[in-house]
Image (spheres, helix red, strand yellow):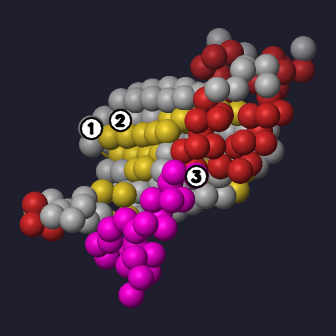
Amino acid sequence: MTMEERKAKGLLWTDTPEAMEAQARARGLVYDFYHTRPEEKEKRMELLQQIFGSLGKDVWIEPPLTLAFGKTVSIGDNTYINSNLTLVDDYTIKIGSGVLFAPNVTISATGHPVHHKLRTHGEMYSFPVTIGDNVWIGSGAVILPGVTIGNNSVIGAGSIVTKDIPADCIAVGNPCRVLREITDDDLIYYYKNRRVDEETSE
């Protein structure tokens, strides 16, 4: 069984020379991305297309960005990623459309075994991470291997997400837990009790 097959089955795996070469290529592209000027939008987009496995329309990523492979990551349309996103992306990370990332978010698809005897050669395990559409992830949040976050949910700043979060809710804390559902009452909060359709029609 190859290391990629072991990874896909959730078994322990270790890096290979081929994987290390792929990481070096990806990090070289990220280095080039770091060193673009803010006004070089076309150059940035060209580099991001090379870095990621799939990149939707109107995606904006503020440097710095840290990752291992890039090609294991897909990002949907109209997603905004603020500075200092860290992707431990040895395995699949799927980010939906309309997602907002505050600064200093970490998404890890990989971890290490708890018992030291299973880490002798740098053994790791990986599970996919999925972030649904229209999710907002607050500053400093950490999302751990195997987690799925449902559509439209909000993850509070500083949260450590260890388990799946359902759709349409606010979840906060360490470990991250559902605080409440998002309801239509949340539509009027910022409009001072005016109807949203009235505000937007002006």
Whole-number angstrom distance, CA of label 2 to CA of label 3 = 32 Å
Question: Nearer the viewer's eye, disc 2 or disc 3?
Answer: 3
Are the residues tagged 2 and 1 within 8 Å (C-beta)? yes
Disc tally is 3
Q: Secondary structure at mark 1?
A: loop
Q: Where 15 falls versus 24 (above or below)?
A: below
Say which label, 2 or 1, has the lower sequence index.
Answer: 2
Q: Residue 79's spot in the image, x, y percent?
A: 68, 39
In the picture, measured across the screen, residue 75 lies left or right of residue 180, that is: right
**Residue underneath mark 2:** 159
Residue 107: in sight, yes or no? Answer: yes
Of the image marks 2 and 3, the number of the one nearer the N terminus? 3
The type of residue carrying mark 3 is Arg
Q: Is residue 192 above or below residue 57?
A: above
Q: Secondary structure at mark 3?
A: helix
**x and y, in percent, of residue 21 in the image:** 51, 59
Q: What quarter of the picture does the N terminus occupy?
A: bottom left
**Three-letter amino acid code at the position of disc 1:** Asn
Residue 125, compared with residue 195, is above or below; it is below
Q: Is residue 195 visible?
A: no
- Few, some or many residues within 10 Å of mark 1 (<14, 14–19, 20+): few
Task: Return the residue nearer the eye: 173 or 26.
Answer: 26
Q: Mark 3 or mark 1, which is nearer the start of the sequence?
A: 3
Crowding at mark 2 (Cα within 10 Å: few <14, some 14-19, many 20+): many
Instruction: Read off the residue under disc 3.
Output: 25
- Tell me the quarter of the picture where residue 116 sits: bottom left
On the image, the x and y values in percent for residue 64 come to 54, 29
Q: Which residues are magenta?
A: 1-25
Q: CA distance from mark 1 to mark 3?
A: 35 Å
Q: Give the amino acid type for the residue marked by disc 2 in the picture.
A: Ser
Quick one: 76 or 119, which is closer to the camera? 119
Please name the residue that numbered disc 1 is placed on.
Answer: 174
